[in-house]
Amino acid sequence: MITIKEIAQRLNMSTTTVSNVIHGKEGEVSEETRIKVQEFLKEVDYVPNINARNLAQNESKIIGLALKARVDKYENLIMDPFVSELIGGIEETIRNAGYFMMLYISRDTEKIMRHVSTWNVDGLILFGMLDDDGVRVSEKYKKPIVCIDTYSMEGLKHFTNVGLDDLGGTYEMVKYMISCGHRKIAFLSDNTNGVDLARFQGYIKALREAGIQFEQEDFLKIRPASAEIEESLDEICIKAMNYTAIMCVSDLYAVTLMSALTDRGIRVPEGISIAGFDDNMLGSLYRPALTTVHQDVKEKGIIAAETLLKKLAGEETAAQITLPTKLVIRDTVTKPRRLPLYNALKN
Amino acid sequence: MITIKEIAQRLNMSTTTVSNVIHGKEGEVSEETRIKVQEFLKEVDYVPNINARNLAQNESKIIGLALKARVDKYENLIMDPFVSELIGGIEETIRNAGYFMMLYISRDTEKIMRHVSTWNVDGLILFGMLDDDGVRVSEKYKKPIVCIDTYSMEGLKHFTNVGLDDLGGTYEMVKYMISCGHRKIAFLSDNTNGVDLARFQGYIKALREAGIQFEQEDFLKIRPASAEIEESLDEICIKAMNYTAIMCVSDLYAVTLMSALTDRGIRVPEGISIAGFDDNMLGSLYRPALTTVHQDVKEKGIIAAETLLKKLAGEETAAQITLPTKLVIRDTVTKPRRLPLYNALKN
DNA sequence: ATCATTAAAAAAACCTCTTTACAAAATTTG
DNA sequence: CAAATTTTGTAAAGAGGTTTTTTTAATGAT
């Protein structure tokens, strides 16, 4: 790899001059030498040593993307398939702005923090953080931070959260279910944190507005760890008979549930109506096609990246950006066609 | 951020000594000072400036992962959902070995090459490369390279290709279809390059072995660009009536086809048998559950990363590593239950 | 011709860390 | 006890850029 020093030597000039040409400093160098240098640079295909440049300029042009991955019971990382879409959106935006992306996957916040400071990244995008992880990171290293889908950090001025109108999404969907004639509607999820909580609240809101009482048992908890999944689905499918519709917290769970119901001879939507959330391939390719709440994941990534870029440019940014959702009415929610088996399980 | 110089100053010693302690140089520093320095380092939570270190050592501890993304007709990047699984496997392996991962997505080989040399990455993992891209990259920058799923580069000693027994996979599957009684079997794909070609060849091999003649029209070409997809599926579904089974080049296409067939009133497997390739969520969650060829994508990522790590350590590695496949017999391939509509389309 | 002004180029300092060469102190050897 | 060797630590020289300061050369005004 050729260096500036060598170029300067070969052209009989100082490194300063070469550097100035590279940085397009107007009025620092004569037209004649500028052209001479530029041609030579092209000829030898000069590429600057990024470490030297970063060291000198005290910046890195690196944006860190830290994914706090979930792990299953065997400590294997679970990568949501939608992560690739998110990454795609972020990377494209960042690259077009001349930055690079360093990817870091971990469930250990400490490690992520160390990584951040080691690499002296210019900014950070955090995804999947819970609790106050992001706050801690940002307080320690005063770098611009954008979080994605992180509810616990709202209201903090340090950084921006790019999220979704999760509450509104389920609210609209459950309202739609009610308008179809459903009264016994369950909610399926595996936890009540962050995004899932907001979606649950939307469900509750729609229920309340329609004067439907929510009982604790209406929350169907799925245990996604692979070893338990079949047992868990058995339980959920039988409980499902108590309802005419189920609002699922994600398309993944909606499709998982539909498969399980089909396997047990219960038809969707004839036997029970199912709605999902996310609108990914899983639901659109399934038959019956899944009625769901749409979100644009790539857009989320792009907005997150753009926001970070703005912060890096010193612009003010909102503390919270909330993307809208859209109902996608397909084939899995219809008017109820059977009676709910009220309380059949109660003793 | 505290620097070595400052630490040395505060402890009244030279930077060399501090550096030696950091690098655990035995016999270069007394036990007493070693402890003193170590304690101070911990106290101030010293983190080395990676740019300075890399500059001095002429290495980067960065492994570049370059994904050559496909684009659809609107120039949007298409990120395969399985990419996240691949990335997950690579990142985990790399990180455990003390390396970092820089992600670069592009369909422009030139840009990828520039990126590589700019960042002076220690090694490269290439995915989705076609033609001789990888060769060109590796000849220009003499860095260790591992390619994933790149057929065109076999036999070149410069780097290792981590691939799959694609040919064997479809071969076994089509053999299985034939053993079920199928004679009219089509192959569905969108191209005949690289991986898809190998899978096609497996199909041909099984056909030939069974004495079945392959006709050009038995290759069903799907046009995945979103604007054309419905039209394309119409055509494929009607052509499909000429066959009792279809071997699809991927689970994605298998499921897409099943949805399309279902929408047009053709039932799987009653009306037609379908097999996929990859064994991802899409197929396992669909009902009827997809009969397919399994590959372990995460494992692929891990092996690729491990191989690169070996190269970096100076170990010899094979030029080609081929991972095995496994038939996953589920519900979409049964014995044929209707007659193929031979030649109904021929005029 | 002299001095101030400006343009262009070069020299020098710096960014942080590693490494080499060397010096001082401590220890061993004869 | 002097010489040789080892231990411990320092100073200085890079690594490849950027940036500030200085020098040189050219121009113009007086």
Image (spheres, coloured by chain):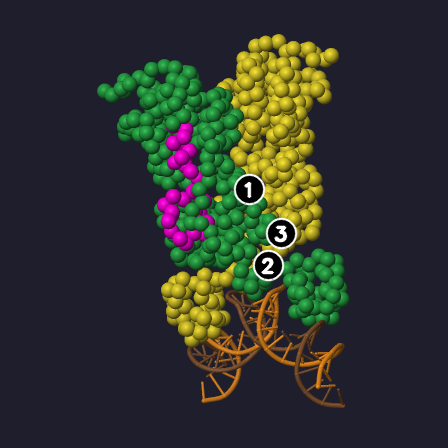
Chain colours: A green, B yellow, C brown, D orange
**Residue A197 screen position, x and y as percent:** 35, 37
Answer whether residue B168 is visible to the viewer in this image.
no
- Name the quadrant of the N terminus of chain A: bottom right
Q: Nearer the viewer, residue B120 or A65?
A: A65
Q: Does B233 appear above or below B138?
A: above
Q: Which mark is residue A88?
A: 1
Q: Are marks 2 and 1 in contact (CB under 8 Å)?
A: no
Q: Quadrant of residue B156?
A: top right
Give how far apart the Cα atoms at labels 2 and 1 are. Answer: 24 Å
Answer whether residue A335 is visible to the viewer in this image.
yes
**1 or 3: mark nearer the eye:** 1
Query: Which numbered disc flags the more N-terminal residue, 2 or 1?
Result: 2
Give how far apart the Cα atoms at labels 1 and 3 are. Answer: 17 Å
Say what secondary structure mark 2 lies in: helix
Query: Which residue is the site of mark 3?
Result: B115
Q: Nearer the viewer, residue B316 or B288?
A: B288
**Residue B276 screen position, x and y as percent:** 57, 25
**Residue lying at 32% horizontally and 29% vertically, measured from the top left:** A209
Query: Which residue is the site of mark 2?
Result: A50
Three-letter code for the amino acid on which mark 2 is drawn? Ile
Give how far apart the Cα atoms at labels 3 and 2 are. Answer: 10 Å
Q: Which residues are magenta?
A: A145-174
- Name the quadrant of the C terminus of chain A: top left
Three-letter code for the amino acid on which mark 1 is drawn? Gly
